[in-house]
Image (cartoon, grey):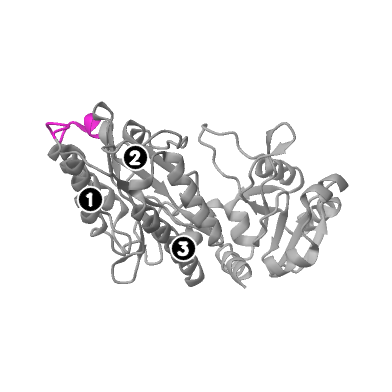
Amino acid sequence: MFHAENRKRFIARTQGALVIVAGYEQMQLSGDMAAPFLQESNFWWLSGIESPGWKMIIDGARGRATLVRPALSAVRQIFDGDLTDDQALVVSGADVVITEDYFDQELKQLARAHPRVLTTLNKVDGEFHANPAQQKLKARLDRIFVAAETCNKELAELRAIKQPTEIERIKKAIKITTDAFAVIKDRWVDYKTEYEVEADFTQYFRRHNAAHGYDPIVAAGPRACTLHYHANGQKIARREAVVVDIGARYAGYSADITRTFCESPSKRVSQVHKAVADAHNAIIKLLEPDLLVSDYIKKSDEIMLDTVMSLGLIESRGDTNGYRRYFPHAVSHGLGVDVHDSLGAPRYLRAGMVLTVEPGIYIPAEAVGVRIEDDILITDTGRQNLSAMLSTDL
């Protein structure tokens, strides 16, 4: 079973430690409406539980996993339903389910034999309000155990190397996404607005048992220079370049693919697109196992500096501030359960890692933005472009 095997590998990595982790809580959207829920990725990877409020105890010394059921009011159960104990055990491969009422009692019993406990605590960069579940659990553990330490690093390093099941799920998410892109590209001349494009992707994903892995981006003309533009509500002009950054989520894993389309491109749009496409291909060719990540970043930056200069946007390779005005984001990130999956801060790329390659050039003064993104698996001998079946043509 997938999640039980994940726990087995994690237990080996932590040398049989006691680990207690929390899934996310349900958050309020507005009034009495709940915000859309997505489970915390480490908790899902270890447990498979997609419902809010659950916790898991992993007793590494005994190889035993206990799920902790949240306390739900009768009203919540009627309106939202409830995951049964049997369903939770089947999904997770855990040994037993206890209720929240017995959680503190279980913790105190465990603390007699385990003064040290591991848990997860995601970093928050200040842009968002964190889901409170992990902080609440950490405070609870701090009161009962001598030491409550985090194990995010160990989990990130494990999750960075994708197992065969994970690679197959990512490939399926990519196949759904590239098939949807092909359908949309064939219909491109019929689209008059950004929201029509988004709507057809959404329909295609849902008809293939998938969902959006992240907020879709359909950004025409000047809006393509806003990297995380999500409104997708404006008209598309025939000569505007349109950045379409969309990925399906399937069976817990996401694709992340970007193409730039234009019905009647100007000479400048075609020039920028070709420059980005050439950089994209050159950067992909750098990827291989045992490549120093610092070397990859350095060489990618050199390629993008040359690209920016070739378009007449800066005059000198030393103009790093100017360079970053036109290419302000990283060229790659990990991909998996999270669309920005951690690779565990590795020194070298390793076989089994999946990462994106997404160069882009953004020129606000010209109302032109172009980005091309593919999903790459590092193999034992090189790399495999998992989304290569989708043309990068304008």
- Asked if marks 3 and 2 touch (Cβ < 8 Å), the reply is no
User: Farthest residue toward the top?
Assistant: 365
Disc 3 to disc 2, how far (Cα)?
Answer: 23 Å
- Is residue 211 among what the camera can see? yes
* The disc label shown at residue 329, or none: 2
Helix, strand or loop status at disc 3: helix
Residue 363 location in percent, x, y? 25, 32
- Main secondary structure type of the part rendered in magenta: loop
Residue 383 location in percent, x, y? 30, 65
Give the residue type that dot 1 points to.
Ala
Mark closest to the chain's N terminus, 3 or 2: 3
Q: Is 115 part of what is drawn in magenta? A: no
Disc 1 to disc 3, how far (Cα)?
Answer: 23 Å
Helix, strand or loop status at disc 1: helix
Disc 3 marks which residue? 170
Q: Is residue 353 above or below residue 269?
A: below
User: Residue 265 is drawn in which quadrant?
Assistant: top left
Disc 1 marks which residue? 277
Disc 1 to disc 2, how far (Cα)?
Answer: 17 Å
Give the residue type that dot 2 points to.
His
Question: In percent of the image, x 67 and y 48: which residue is there?
Answer: 147
Q: Is 318 part of what is drawn in magenta? A: yes
Disc count in the image?
3
Give the residue type that dot 3 points to.
Ile
Disc 3 packing (10 Å; few <14; some 14–19; many ≥20)? many
Question: In percent of the image, x 67 and y 51: which residue is there?
Answer: 23
Q: Which residues are magenta?
A: 312-323
Helix, strand or loop status at disc 2: loop
Q: Is residue 262 above or below residue 183?
A: above
| Quarter placement of the N terminus | bottom right
Residue 276 location in percent, x, y? 23, 46
Mark closest to the chain's N terminus, 1 or 2: 1
